[in-house]
Image (cartoon, grey):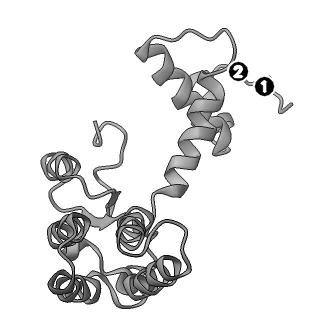
Amino acid sequence: MLKERGIYDAEERVWVSDGAKWEWKLKEYHDPDGKEIVDFIHASEHLKELATEIYGEETERSKLCWECMQKALREEGGQTVLRALKQLRVKSGKTKVKETIVYFQNNVSRMDYPEYEEEGYHITSSMVESACLFMVGDRLKRSGMRWTEEGAQYTTTLRLKWKNNEWEGFWMKYRPGMSGYQKL
């Protein structure tokens, strides 16, 4: 599928995911050489849940703890946060601490955020998610719309051409005999 869409042959491919094992397995199957990044926002949410369990919901200590861990994650990477979490485990027997440690252990190699940002990579999937909502959801979920998967794919492909200012070139290639075509 990636090859058909001209993505697989890209010079560099970066996969940003929430860290679920099944997503990395899927990525490995389709694109073993692509770079892997855990979505920073998702990793940060794990830290927020942990801070909430330790210090209580919506408390000042919880907020400060989360902000501190979030800052360390972004500025120093997952390895620094993992070391701190392992020290925290000694002090706390709480379940969320253990779960968060496992999550970070499974994904620490994908959490080098300072390096990713220095290289110019996006560390969240929010741009793609927003594009999906705007490009696909906006068009396909209008009132009264009914779509087959095939029809939705065709419509989405054409909408992307339009939004990326590729419509005229596409149309002229598709309909080369239309010499009288005028831009609207």
Residue 59 appears left or right of 78:
right
Compared to residue 95, the image places residue 167 above or below, namely above
Residue 170 shows up from this direction: no
Estimate the x, y position of residue 149 in percent, counting from the top left. 41, 16
Is the C-beta separation of discs 2 and 1 under 8 Å?
yes
Estimate the x, y position of residue 181 in percent, counting from the top left. 78, 25
Pick the residue in front: 4 or 44.
Answer: 44
Residue 132 appears left or right of 18:
right
Residue 176 appears left or right of 12:
right
Compared to residue 83, the image places residue 47 above or below, namely above
Compared to residue 70, the image places residue 163 above or below, namely above
List the residue tagged with mark 2.
178
How crowded pointer 2 is (Cα within 10 Å; few <14, some 14-19, many 20+) is rated as few
List the residue tagged with mark 1.
181
Estimate the x, y position of residue 75 in percent, counting from the top left. 42, 89
Pick the residue in front: 46 or 92.
Answer: 92
Residue 170 — which label? none
Amino acid type at mark 1: Tyr
Pick the residue in front: 68 or 170.
Answer: 68
* Residue at (46, 24) in percent of width and height: 153
Compared to residue 154, the image places residue 19 above or below, namely below
Estimate the x, y position of residue 66 in percent, counting from the top left. 45, 78
Q: Quarter of the image containing the N terminus?
A: top left
**For the residue labelled by badge 2, is the local secondary structure a helix, a strand or a loop?**
loop
* Residue at (24, 61) in percent of width and height: 34
* Residue at (32, 65) in percent of width and height: 38
- Residues under labels 2 and 1: Cα distance? 6 Å
Residue 179 shows up from this direction: yes
How crowded pointer 1 is (Cα within 10 Å; few <14, some 14-19, many 20+) is rated as few
Amino acid type at mark 2: Met
